[in-house]
Image (cartoon, rainbow, N blue to C red):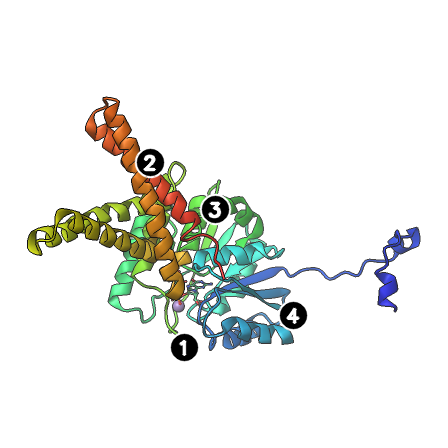
């Protein structure tokens, strides 16, 4: 057929409209796999999925955060040979939970599963999860390490303790009967996901706890036990900052409606910066005997740099700046916060002159300065990725 003719802009004739539309229905099940540096695991996971889901209508969507080890390239090579495989490559962003959400939003499948790429979750549970969702009136099936038949595998004692602590902390957010709210392995009905979707925090690692806490109605669930496997290749991305992310998630669910958690984190770091300021000031002024103005200037520089570095590590972990961008970020941060300091000073001075109590004048200055610093650095220092 002449392609140019079929693409012509002539209005469709009635006969054309009667021509049958070819039918290529989308998959029933979509398996979302968040990846970061999983180059050596993705092909093996796909092989195992083919084995345990030989006949079904399914697809697998890898959501990769621009892994330096070339995971996305590897996935695209697999996709070139199997149209059920897709790759979403996110540039300039990080985050397990937000990657899962993006994957789930990119498909029309009726059932959405999330599974890790590193073969630690038992993919043989997937057919049973699917059956449960098809047959029963439930919204979600959760792979649990604590339900009957489940086990932590060879997790070390420290990590196991942390996980139990996080589980206990989550009790304010999720139903008590859920044995493993920290699980990253589950299958959910699409409507249940869509209902929660706009309320999700999408912070850090814990997408399941987020889903339970964000759903406008109680999710009807069922758990299936599985044994947490040993990672074959690559390494875990769980680190101490993941604990911070988790605390932010819990905080967001508790107070996020009234106050952005990033602002709370930013202010906490700012308060720590004051401590740094006084430490540096007293060393420079009292120990090294520099002039007060020079000591104060050094202290301001150190405190600002400290604030920038810590915010970059924690508050804006998902948009962390490195290398040259770190330097550029530091510069914009210093500029933005200098303006903030001027505003702080200006407002406090004029309130004080207008006969307001000095603590009130100071507090208003600090508040306006903090809000300015937060908004300005969110937009510039950690704004959309450039270059
Ligand atoms: N896209 C993306 N972005 N993927 C990520 C990121 C990220 O920032 N961080 C981790 N991943 C991917 C990993 O590549 C892996 O496929 C999966 O998310 C889990 O990461 P691991 O680093 O292997 O986590 P873990 O083994 O310590 O913990 C996992 O299992 C626990 C038990 O179910 C996670 O799924 C936890 O959430 C879960 O509690
Ligand atoms: Mn893992």
Residue at 61 percent of width and 65 percent of height: 58
Residue beneath disc 4: 83
- Whether pointer 4 and pointer 2 mark residues with C-beta atoms closer than 8 Å, the reply is no
- Which badge, 3 or 1, comes first in the chain's sequence? 3
The reply to whether callout 3 and callout 1 are in contact (CB within 8 Å) is no
Q: Residues within 10 Å of mark 1 (few under 14, many from 20)?
A: few
Res 232 label? 1
Nearest-to-viewer mark from 3 and 1: 1
Horizontal relation, residue 160 to residue 114: left or right? left
Q: Is residue 138 left or right of residue 330?
A: right
Q: Which residue is at a point 45% across and 56% down the rendered structure image?
A: 97
Where does the image place residue 160, in percent across and percent down from the top left?
Answer: 28, 63
The nearer-to-camera label among 4 and 3 is: 4
Instruction: Give the mark nearer the N terminus: 4 vs 2.
Output: 4
Q: Which is more N-terminal, label 2 or label 3?
A: 3
- Residue 144 spot, x, y in % from top left: 40, 60
Alpha carbon distance from label 1 to label 2: 51 Å
Disc 4 to disc 3, C-alpha distance: 33 Å
Q: Which mark is residue 368?
A: 2
| C-beta proximity under 8 Å, tags 4 and 3 | no
Marks 4 and 3, the one that precedes in the sequence: 4
User: Which-is-in-front pick, marks 3 and 2?
Assistant: 2
User: Is 352 drawn above or below residue 74 in the view shown?
Assistant: above
Q: Is residue 132 visible?
A: no
Circle 2: element type? helix
Give how far apart the Cα atoms at labels 3 and 2 are.
Answer: 41 Å
Residue 219 shows which numbered tag?
3
Marker disc for residue 221 = none
The numbered mark, 1 or 4, whose residue comes first in the sequence reads: 4
């Amino acid at each position: 057929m002449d392609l140019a003719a079929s693409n012509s802009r002539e209005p469709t004739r009635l006969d054309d409209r009667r021509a049958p539309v070819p039918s290529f229905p989308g998959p029933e099940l979509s398996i979302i796999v968040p990846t970061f540096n999983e180059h050596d695991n993705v092909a093996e996971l796909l092989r195992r999925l083919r084995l345990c889901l030989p006949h079904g209508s399914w697809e697998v969507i890898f959501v990769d955060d621009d892994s330096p080890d070339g995971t996305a390239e590897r996935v695209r090579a697999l996709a070139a040979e199997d149209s059920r495989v897709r790759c979403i490559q996110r540039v300039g962003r990080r985050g397990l939970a937000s990657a899962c959400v993006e994957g789930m939003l990119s498909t029309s499948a009726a059932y959405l599963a999330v599974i890790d790429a590193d073969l630690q979750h038992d993919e043989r549970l997937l057919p049973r999860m699917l059956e449960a969702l098809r047959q029963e009136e439930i919204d979600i099936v959760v792979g649990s390490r604590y339900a009957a038949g489940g086990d932590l595998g060879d997790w070390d004692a420290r990590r196991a303790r942390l996980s139990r602590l996080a589980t206990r902390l989550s009790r304010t957010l999720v139903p008590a009967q859920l044995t493993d709210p920290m699980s990253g392995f589950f299958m959910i009905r699409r409507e249940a996901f869509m209902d929660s979707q706009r309320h999700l925090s999408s912070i850090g690692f814990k997408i399941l706890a987020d889903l339970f806490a964000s759903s406008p109605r109680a999710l009807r669930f069922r758990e299936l036990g599985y044994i947490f496997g040993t990672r074959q290749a690559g390494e875990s991305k769980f680190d101490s900052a993941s604990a911070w992310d988790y605390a932010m998630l819990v905080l967001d669910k508790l107070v996020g409606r009234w106050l952005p958690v990033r602002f709370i984190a930013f202010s906490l770091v700012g308060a720590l910066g004051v401590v740094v300021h006084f430490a540096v000031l007293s060393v420079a002024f009292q120990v090294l005997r520099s002039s007060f103005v020079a000591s104060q200037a050094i202290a301001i520089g150190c405190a600002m740099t400290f604030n920038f570095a810590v915010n970059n590590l924690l508050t804006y972990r998902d948009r962390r700046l490195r290398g040259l961008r770190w330097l550029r970020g530091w510069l914009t941060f210093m500029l933005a916060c200098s303006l903030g300091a001027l505003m702080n000073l200006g407002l406090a001075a004029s309130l004080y002159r207008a006969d307001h109590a000095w603590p009130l004048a100071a507090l208003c200055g600090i508040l306006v300065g903090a809000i300015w610093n937060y908004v300005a650095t969110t937009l510039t220092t950690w704004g959309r990725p450039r270059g």
